[in-house]
Amino acid sequence: MPAKPAPQPSETSVLTEELAELEHEQWEVWSRSLISQLLDDITPFETVKIRNRVLAKHQRWLKLWKPYSELTEEEKEQDRIWARKVEACVLEKKNAEIDVLRGKINPMEIDLSCMREACSAMEKEIDALKITNNTLRKVNKDMENIIRELEQENAELKKGSRP
């Protein structure tokens, strides 16, 4: 007999707020690290579009790099969305453990979908970061090649223009 669906946590429980605050702290550490890496990787020769996107993201995130308690309710709600997902997953696992202890279900039947979803979401984030990083590296290499070609053309022009 499969585990019954976990009850949904209350909309703004104390636990939800604590988890949201942790989520915000985790996001802040991650976003600071990511933007630092992207800003370090940008060269003066990056396309204007890529540079502007990274700089715009940086400016937007700068406004959010503050303690959870200082966020607006709208900003806090973004963290609460993820906190509620964690809370629902924990409640689901807790209920499954209780059902196992009561002999209602076999431990092998516990649904691991929450853990799979979390792993899948993290893998997608990692893939997105890899794509962004690889794109920046490719653009950088392309720009370096263009610079080399222009330097060669310039050198050839100088040789040909001498009397």
Image: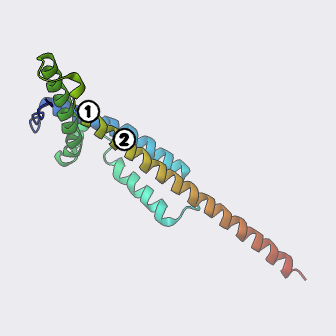
**Label drawn at residue 125:** none
Horizontal and vertical percent position of residue 92: 17, 30
Q: Quadrant of residue 107?
A: top left
Q: Which residue is the extreme one toward the right? A: 163
Protein image colouring: rainbow
Q: Is residue 94 above or below residue 132?
A: above
Q: Is residue 27 above or below residue 98?
A: below
The amino acid beneath tag 1 is Leu
Which numbered mark, 1 or 2, is in the foreground of this view? 1
Quadrant occupied by the C terminus:
bottom right
- Asked if one can make out residue 43 in the rendered structure from this viewpoint, the answer is no
Q: Is residue 87 left or right of residue 22?
A: left
Instruction: In this rendered view, identify the residue nearer to me: 125 or 11.
Output: 125
Residue picked out by circle 2: 122
Quadrant occupied by the N terminus:
top left
Q: Is residue 36 above or below residue 48?
A: above
Q: Look at 12% across and 35% down and name the residue there.
A: 5
- Kindly report the distance in space between the C-alpha atoms of the residues bearing marks 1 and 2: 16 Å
Residue picked out by circle 1: 112
Horizontal and vertical percent position of residue 99: 13, 22
The local secondary structure at tag 2 comes to: helix
Horizontal and vertical percent position of residue 68: 25, 37
Instruction: In this rendered view, identify the residue nearer to me: 101 or 10.
Output: 101
The amino acid beneath tag 2 is Met
What crowding class fits label 1: few (fewer than 14 Cα within 10 Å), some (14-19), or many (20 or more)? few
How many discs appear?
2
Horizontal and vertical percent position of residue 132: 47, 53
Q: Look at 42% across and 50% down and name the residue there.
A: 128
Q: Is residue 159 above or below residue 114?
A: below
Q: Look at 72% across and 65% down and name the residue there.
A: 148
Q: Is residue 142 left or right of residue 70?
A: right
Q: Look at 26% across and 33% down and name the residue there.
A: 112
